[in-house]
Image (cartoon, grey):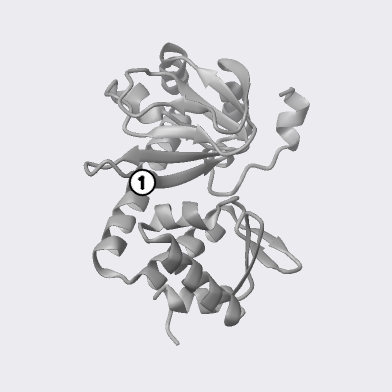
């Protein structure tokens, strides 16, 4: 990606790259090697011992892990402007999850030594990385709390609110989710059975809270969705 092109890119507001100063962002994007990956490519395997970092330029990846029962859990979605693999690079522990591309992806692959040198030279980036890790941990904690006490309808609404707030794009139809998730993938993300998710989506469409298409969800009534999620007052 050229310097001119980097200046033109508008990273998602919640992403790591958007929180960096232009000079620091450029320095980070000058590190490592530019790589492109096809859909379904595994970037990192759960349990592997590696320490390199990916800076996502565009595209989307899925973060998954195998539970103690042997089931595959979808933990999170990451898109362009975010950094992945930073935790193992910092603590040198085995990878805690598997990361797979959800479509074509461009990323910069940065070795641990270069990443650490960059953080040492750019304290603002080190602070931003710390905030990013903290945000990911908060997301994980919220999901565990939701799973322990909320019905599936509420969990789905909360995930839709979170994803649309973080990645959403305003369109004439409403707020597009911004992440291409199938209903089975969403079921895995909220820990619910697929038929239950299909039923809840049908209800939300009937109430005109959302509309759906192929790998596309549009929030038509954000306020109503927040009420269903228990995040507001009637």
Residue 189 left/right relative to 7: left
The residue that appears at 43% across and 28% down in the rendered structure is 123
The picture quadrant where one finds residue 57 is: top right
The picture quadrant where one finds residue 32 is: top right
Q: Quadrant of the C terminus?
A: bottom left
In what element is the residue under mark 1?
strand
* Residue positioned most to the top: 113
The residue that appears at 55% across and 36% down in the rendered structure is 20
Whether residue 30 can be seen here: no
Neighbour tally class for label 1: few under 14, some 14-19, many 20 plus, Cα within 10 Å: some
* Residue positioned most to the left: 68
Up the image or down, 52 lies above or below 143; here it is: above
Q: Quadrant of the N terminus?
A: top right
Judging by the rendered image, the residue that carries numbered circle 1 is 73
Up the image or down, 29 lies above or below 39; here it is: above
* Residue positioned most to the front: 195
Q: Position of residue 173 (x, y in %)?
A: 73, 69
Residue 67 left/right relative to 170: left
The picture quadrant where one finds residue 21 is: top right
Of 46 and 168, the residue lying toward us: 46
Q: Position of residue 87 (x, y in %)?
A: 35, 30
């Amino acid at each position: 990606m050229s310097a001119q092109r980097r200046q033109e890119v508008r990273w998602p507001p919640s992403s790591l790259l958007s929180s960096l100063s232009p000079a620091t962002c450029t320095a980070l994007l000058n590190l490592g090697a530019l790589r492109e990956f096809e859909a379904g490519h595994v970037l990192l395997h759960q349990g592997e011992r590696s320490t390199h970092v990916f800076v996502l330029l565009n595209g989307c990846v899925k973060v998954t892990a195998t539970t103690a029962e042997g089931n595959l859990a979808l933990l999170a979605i990451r898109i362009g402007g975010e950094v992945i693999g930073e935790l193992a690079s910092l603590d040198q522990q085995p990878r805690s999850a598997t990361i797979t591309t959800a479509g074509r992806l461009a990323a910069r692959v940065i070795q641990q030594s270069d990443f650490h040198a960059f953080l040492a030279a750019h304290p603002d980036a080190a602070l931003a990385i710390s905030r990013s890790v903290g945000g990911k941990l908060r997301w994980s904690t919220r999901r565990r709390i939701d799973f322990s006490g909320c019905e599936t309808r509420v969990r789905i609404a909360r995930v839709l609110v979170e994803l649309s707030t973080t990645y959403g794009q305003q369109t004439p139809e409403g707020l597009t989710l911004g992440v291409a998730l199938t209903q089975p993938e969403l079921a895995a993300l909220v820990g619910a059975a697929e038929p239950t998710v299909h039923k809840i989506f049908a209800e939300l469409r009937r109430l005109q809270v959302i509309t759906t298409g192929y790998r596309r969800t549009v929030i038509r009534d954000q306020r109503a969705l927040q009420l269903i999620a228990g995040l507001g007052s009637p």
